[in-house]
Image (cartoon, helix red, strand yellow):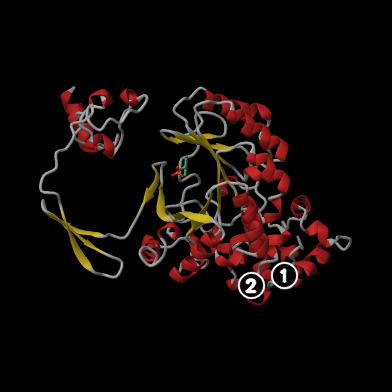
Amino acid sequence: MTPIYSEQQQELASQIDGNTSLKNWKDWRWQLKHSIRDIRTIERLLNVQFEPEERKTLENTVKKFPLSVTPYYLSLIDREDFRNDPVFKQCTPNPNELIIGAHDMADPLHEEADSPAPGITHRYPDRVLFHISNVCSMYCRHCTRKRKVGDQEFIPNRETIEAGLEYIRTTPQVRDVLLSGGDPLMLSDEYLDWVLSELDTIEHVEVVRIGTRMPVVLPYRITTDLVNMLKTHQPLWINTHFNHPREITASSREALRMLADGGFPLGNQTVLLAGVNDCPRIIRVLVHKLVQNRVRPYYLYQCDLSEGLTHFRTPVSKGIEIIESLIGHTSGFAVPTYVIDAPGGGGKIPVMPNYLISWSTHKVILRNYEGVITSYQEPESYQSVFCDRNCDDCRLTLKLDDADEYQSIGIEKLLSYDDDAISLVPADNERHQRREDAAE
Ligand SMILES: *Cc1c(COP(=O)(O)O)cnc(C)c1O
């Protein structure tokens, strides 16, 4: 395969390391070793000069929220118009990061409160996040775990990982393990192979997922050796994080091709960011490029309420506008689910434009993406199946192991026939607290 370099990359490579060859440029360890971590180097390599005042503010920002960017990712910046460049905005500090908004939180998703074992966040019934690396090859300025970036640069040792594995091993409801971080692909192939092999031995773990930004910020990490190792741990799903069409380069296409050919279903999680991708046209081009490269757009995230992200936040209406411009207008599999990760640890909540306009006992009134208003006739008779979760007596003959242990939660509980619950009430509801107090 002929290596792919732009002129800017050749220039950068020799600026960073006069003795380097272009072969090194494609070596992911060389890229990591030469990651840029200070403002002066950014200026030198981008051939720009900040005013002394601005440089000082930027350096102060870096003191609070560290900087790290791979030469590869830096090479994607359009130097002529760097201030408006989506790559520049994602990897270099902005003084606005120091403005902490009234509603910002260090840990808005309460990941620490939902952590029953080292590195584990167990929020949903059947799946866990497993943070197996505390490092990233590029520090996204919009990181939701910004509070942690750069302050604990280490790969958790085997004992720590063992403790997380032990939790998974002894928690049979976990059928899906999401390896996250940091970036799990910062681990060596051998170390990752060990973690994945341990997970393979746990019978109730049905699927493993890896969340990584490597195809975006350091595509050379996707090597034949890595893919061959990962192939021995199927079923494995891989999710990446492209935010802008400019990030889909020849090198990242090659990385995606290798992963797709390796047989891993690929997904993408985009964060909606003001000044970067808060535009229906940009997102549409992005999702089209993704599906061309066999990546299914999975989530579009509303920006979290983490400290230092205020300048990146858009109103929720922008996300709805974007989804409105996709549904019906383009392939269904190119449309991500727009989600808000509930502050306080409520998990991801999908948000959509409204298509259901009205409803009677006979008809449902809907509108389509063109604005056509239509009606759907409800069935005249529908015999609903009484369900007490006893599948043996069911005429649907749907046999599910463990169905009798099934416990419904949330809205599903209210819809269920075999649960007496008539309402769901928050634990700190004052009205209910007064009732209880009165009853005592
Ligand atoms: C996002 C997330 C998951 C995975 O959620 P899916 O909707 O299944 O992709 C699991 N655990 C935590 C804590 C998460 O934030």
Q: Residue at x 16, y 27 (%)?
A: 438
Viewer-nearest residue: 297 or 72: 297
Viewer-nearest residue: 78 or 254: 254
Distance of label 1 from label 2 (alpha carbons): 9 Å
Q: Residue at x 53, y 55 (%)?
A: 295
Work out whether residue 106 can be spotted.
yes
Residue tagged by mark 2? Answer: 82
> Which secondary structure, mark 2?
helix
> Which secondary structure, mark 1?
helix
**Residue flagged by tag 2: what amino acid is it?**
Phe
Q: Quadrant of residue 228?
A: top right
Q: Quadrant of the C terminus?
A: top left
Q: Quadrant of the N terminus?
A: bottom right
Callout 1 touching callout 2 (CB < 8 Å):
yes
Q: Residue at x 31, y 66 (%)?
A: 369
Residue positioned most to the right: 19
The answer to whether residue 137 is left or right of residue 297 is right
Residue tagged by mark 1? Answer: 46
- The percent position of residue 429, horizontal first and vertical second, equals 26, 37
Q: Quadrant of residue 387?
A: top left
- The percent position of residue 106, horizontal first and vertical second, equals 50, 46
The answer to whether residue 416 is left or right of residue 308 is left
The answer to whether residue 7 is left or right of residue 319 is right
**Residue flagged by tag 1: what amino acid is it?**
Leu
Work out whether residue 151 can be spotted.
no
- The percent position of residue 47, horizontal first and vertical second, equals 74, 73
Q: Compared to 92, does 378 lie above or below?
A: above
